[in-house]
Image (cartoon, rainbow, N blue to C red):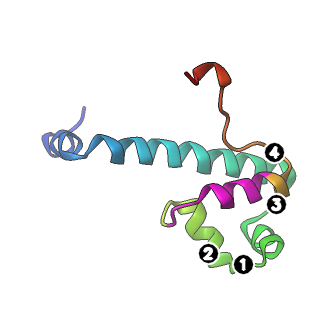
Amino acid sequence: MRSKVADRIQSETPEEERIFVRQYTHIVLRINQILIAKGYTQKSLAEKFNKKPSEINKWLKGSHNLTLKTLAKLEADLGEPIIYTSKEQLV
């Protein structure tokens, strides 16, 4: 059972923020699935991208807004899709 405070916070959170958090969570979970399946660590991913491990940590904790360009690079380098889209959903 949620508290009244939690209910109030949720009711005051803009819809676009809730959508952002939900989508970001799905993306990060997918990236982590791929890393585990391929035996990568955050450190090895950082080396592959020539980034500091702390930056990769920010990507995977939600404290950095991943761009589509970064996601495309991740998909290309990891060899797995991260975001799925459906042509049927397009009008």
| Element on which disc 2 rests | helix
Identify residue type, mark 2: Glu
**Prevailing SS of the magenta stretch:** helix
- Which mark is nearer the camera, 3 or 4? 4
Q: Nearer the viewer, residue 88 or 73?
A: 88
Mark closer to the chain start, 2 or 3? 3
| Residue 3 position by quadrant | top left
Identify residue type, mark 4: Glu
Q: Which mark is residue 51?
A: 1
Q: Which mark is residue 80?
A: 4
Classify 91 as above or below 46. Answer: above
Q: Residue at x 72, y 78 (%)?
A: 51
Whole-number angstrom distance, CA of label 1 to CA of label 2: 7 Å
Classify 6 as above or below 85. Answer: below
Place of residue 9 in the rendered image (x, y in percent of width and height, measured from the top left):
20, 47
Q: Which residue is mark 3?
A: 40
Q: Residue at x 72, y 67 (%)?
A: 42
Place of residue 7 in the rendered image (x, y in percent of width and height, measured from the top left):
19, 39
Q: Which residue is mark 2?
A: 55
Identify residue type, mark 1: Lys
Magenta region includes residue 73: yes
Left or right position of 2 against 55:
left
Stretch of the chain drawn in magenta: 64-75
Q: Quadrant of the C terminus?
A: top right
Mark closer to the chain start, 1 or 4? 1
Identify residue type, mark 3: Tyr
